[in-house]
Image: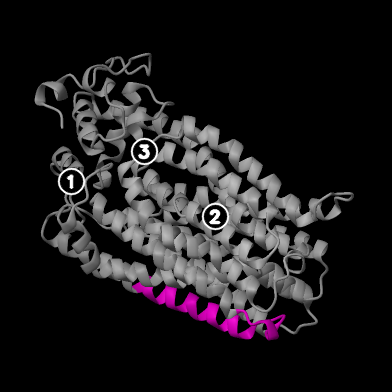
Amino acid sequence: MSTSKEADEAVVVSSDHDFGTSKPVGFLARLKGDRVDLNDVAKIYFQQSLQYDQSQLERDSIRVRRKLDFIVLPMMMTTYMLSFLDKQTLNYSNAYGLQSDTHMTGNQYSWVSSALYFGWLTAAYPWQILLQRYPIGRLIGIMLFIWGAVCMLQAAVFNFSGFFAIRFFLGALEAVISPAFIVLTSMLWTREEQSLRSSFWLSVNGISSILGALLAYGAGHASGLAIPQWKLIYLIVGALTFAWGFVIYLYLPDGPHNAKMLTEYERVVAVWRISRNQTGLKHFKTVPEQIKEALLDEKAWLLFLMAICYGILNGGVTNFLSAIIKGFGYDALRTSLLQTPVGAFELVMVIAFGYLSKLPNMVGATIFIACIPGLAGLIGILKIPINHRFALVGMCWMQGILGSPVILNWTLPGLNTAGHTKRSTVLGIYFVLYCAGNIAGPHLFLENEVPRYPTAIKGLAGAYAGAMGLQIIYTGYCYLENRKKQKMGLLGEANIAEEAMESFNDLTDKQNKHFRYRI
């Protein structure tokens, strides 16, 4: 904790607002960023911002946002694209003899599909503790090195048990990406901007699906290989992931306080920008009272139930889409090629719904609307005559839109949960239950129900309906809470600076009387 003298000399910047060569001196220049309470750092930066004209800060904030959008966001998007590509390698390699080469029988492939989420479930909460204590950028960079190596190891296994073990550890490593990016997004962008930025870094799952399908298609045409074609997919994707780890380790920031692409003045502006989020930056200490509040918060439990629903949907769709399309009578190459439009649907619609969520009071409504295409597609798979193969494939393509309600629902803990320990607890439990749903999802697909899998399709449709109903209740709850505070005069525009400073005191959304829920 800094003294008042240290705080006074903490940030010295040029006052000409030219985004020049000003450098940090004093207290902040000595910070290593590992064990310092970032809320204390944020307070210093915010205090510094108060000496500048607000209209000047508004103008400069646009330039800062553009730097974050064009430098940090692409790094996050590329990382997430590789993570999804790593995960989808199982789906693509399945079309090229994976099960026969590894002697899988019965529902062993379903268990291998679930293994990744067993690993994710096991590691989800421990990663939250590490994210609270250590810098996000370096943590993810190191993880990518290990992750790439583990991905390549999948080419070295020859049986069910080996594949299950490798996929388990791959899932344990991947468990850090989504919660880390949710936290990082909440520290770099305003609450109004977060849903769209989150949609951007998840939309690359669509690009990943296209690249993965084309990679699988290319591997299918490779001849004269010393290894089976499905192993080549793992080696290529793993090597790409390992190499990208160097970029993330060196350049991904842990927050606005150490973003290398920002000058010292720009960091002041970056903190000023997110001060109205009322969620602060990062607090390294675990606060037991916030854990208790997270466990007793009604809206947190609504999120937990939605996590299960979306987990079931994601686990079923991502691992069995190729099996469904192949069951309509297509060969392996054709199946790989027919999956590319799924990525296009996801890329376009996730971003489109992300823009829709930016409108005032439209986050909850957007999540509800985004569920409709996927639900309609499931009904189509179940009802369209089997001889209309292309129409059935079109219904499969609509499942790519699932990414939109998933990512927008992921943003809700970051948008509407304040207090770092409480937010970490909610995110940890959320992703544990999301993983549990992903484990259950593939087991809805029964081997004797090819190609329509009616049990699975009905189960996934029920998960969609449950998620949509819970979203209505969650949005209504937040709306009523905001109305209550509005009537009490707690959500006015007065004392903005005081309220912003209060947000860096690690208060929860219930403790902070001025906190406004995003609906």
404 sits to left or right of 112: left
Q: Nearer the viewer, mark 2 or mark 3?
A: 2
Q: Observer-nearest residue: 426 or 358?
A: 426
Q: Position of residue 328 (x, y in %)?
A: 77, 76
Q: Which residues are magenta?
A: 445-472
Q: Nearer the viewer, mark 2 or mark 1?
A: 2
Instruction: Specify the label residue 170 is tagged with.
Output: 2
* Quadrant assignment for the C terminus: bottom left
Q: Observer-nearest residue: 49 or 319?
A: 319
Instruction: Specify the label residue 140 is tagged with.
Output: none
Q: Observer-nearest residue: 106 or 203?
A: 106
Q: Which element carries disc 2, helix, strand or loop? A: helix
Q: Residue at x 70, y 76 (%)?
A: 105
Q: Mark 3 — residue?
A: 135
Q: Amino acid at mark 2?
A: Leu
Magenta part, dominant SS: helix
Q: Which element carries disc 3, helix, strand or loop? A: loop
